[in-house]
Image: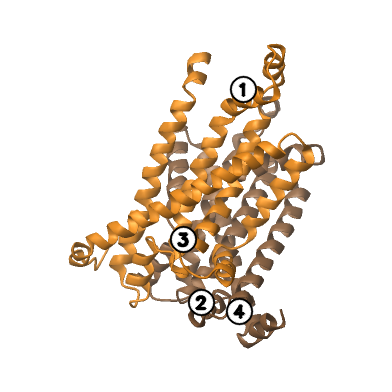
Amino acid sequence: MSGVWTAFIENEGWLRLRRHILLSVVPLAIALVIGVALGILSSRLGRAGRFVIGASAFIARMVPTFAVMALVMALRGVGFWPAVVGLVLLGVPTILLNTATGLDEADRHTIDAARGMGYTEGQLLRKIRLPLALPHIAAGLRTAAVLTIATAALAGLIGADGLGVTIDAGFATNQRDVLLAGAIPVTLLALAADLTLLALQYALTPVALRRRTLLTQQRSSS
Amino acid sequence: MPDIRWDWIARHTDDILNATVDHLLLVVISIGAAIAIAIPLAIVVHPTRLGRAVAASLTTAVYTIPSVALFAVLVAFVGIGRTPAIIGLAAYALVVLVRNTLTGLSEVSAPVLDAARGMGMSHGQLLRRVRLPLALPAILTGVRLATVETVAIATIAVFVAGGGLGEIIYTDGISRDLFLTPILAGTVMAVALALALDLILVTLLRMATRWQRAGSGR
């Protein structure tokens, strides 16, 4: 194990960890904005619009992120932003689908009651649908965060920065300690993000719904 | 799209097709192995709350391990080649499959189970003739999600010398100064493969749930 620690330090571990975090947080923030916006849009469109957005999200999931990053790099050059583009594309579908599920969560009676009180569609969205959707959005963000941190490691293998560079060096020189010095921190980072966002998801869930929604969300995020 | 070298594709058609077949094999073997582990595992653990919780959290823990990291760790123990690729891909597929099988098994309604018991079915018969058939749609949905995901992740197998379309994307494209044509060709084939497999699975799913639509008149 001390060999792994030495390899971590020798491969600029702390610097690459910081860059890895940056390479994960930036695309996640962008994916959150796009995903929630598209989720709201899809909930306000008719069946056809909803189908188009849902189908696009499904197809987007089929495109290997690794290939997207490579494509953007081939067209625009190696670096931070091409990797971000690939990671945004990875995060959006999960957040989008969870947002759409969450917005549909409010039951008909609640919506009827609000309409009866004279709520406009905009108020309905801001004061009822979105608050009820928050736990779902947090669940989507959580799944997307784990995926993004994990996949950001791939960026390091094809020319961007981050802990993937250490993994790449490990593959290239066939040294187990170097491989693990890249792989273990990425795993710990993903785990830390998962637990932090689970706490956020829990905090955003109304007390009465905690048991139920935490269970159902696991399903919708798969 | 600028600069697509159609002549490169023409000269490498065989390579691209071979890589696609390799990719398909990786996916089919990994999903097959994952199904063979996930369904018995779910059947064994689903009667107890503790068993369900342990199985769900163990498989979710696998999910937080980045695929490249998992492959890297596996290489450290089993060497390079198809083996680490298949183990890694199967481990990921396991997450969705265990979760969906558990959901399917637990969603069989109590009256249905009571009726089956009232007809004198044994525990084994209940499982074979009632629970599993009713869980089939959920299980197949899990297989669908896992397959689409595995086709995408399998492009990374190239880093452990596991073959597949990653060879076209990485070896022919990225490592040759980000040569666009192979990257694009490999990506298109991966998406096409995912779509084709998904179409087959949707058809299976529809066949498996025909009785549901017939019964409820939908």
- Residue A115 percent location from the top left of the image: 66, 27
Q: CA distance from mark 2 to mark 1?
A: 49 Å
> Chain in orange?
B
Nearer the observer, B152 or A113: B152
Q: CA distance from mark 2 to mark 4?
A: 17 Å
Disc 2 versus disc 4: nearer the observer:
2
Disc 3 versus disc 1: nearer the observer:
1
Residue corresponding to mark 3? A65
* Dot 3 amino acid type: Thr
> Around disc 4, counting alpha carbons within 10 Å, would you say few (fewer than 14), some (14 to 19), or many (20 or more)?
many
- The chain to which mark 2 is attached is A
Nearer the observer, A192 or A42: A192
* Dot 1 amino acid type: Val
> Around disc 2, counting alpha carbons within 10 Å, would you say few (fewer than 14), some (14 to 19), or many (20 or more)?
many
Which residue is most to the top?
B119
Residue corresponding to mark 1? B130
Of the two numbered discs 3 and 2 on the same chain, state the one appearing first in sequence: 3
Residue at 52% from the left image edge and 50% from the top image edge: A93
Q: CA distance from mark 3 to mark 4?
A: 21 Å
Which label was assigned to residue A171?
2
Q: CA distance from mark 3 to mark 2?
A: 20 Å
Task: Left or right? Give the position of B79 relative to A203.
Answer: left
Task: Left or right? Give the position of A202 relative to A91.
Answer: right
Nearer the observer, A146 or B148: B148
- Residue A124 percent location from the top left of the image: 65, 36
Residue corresponding to mark 4? A16
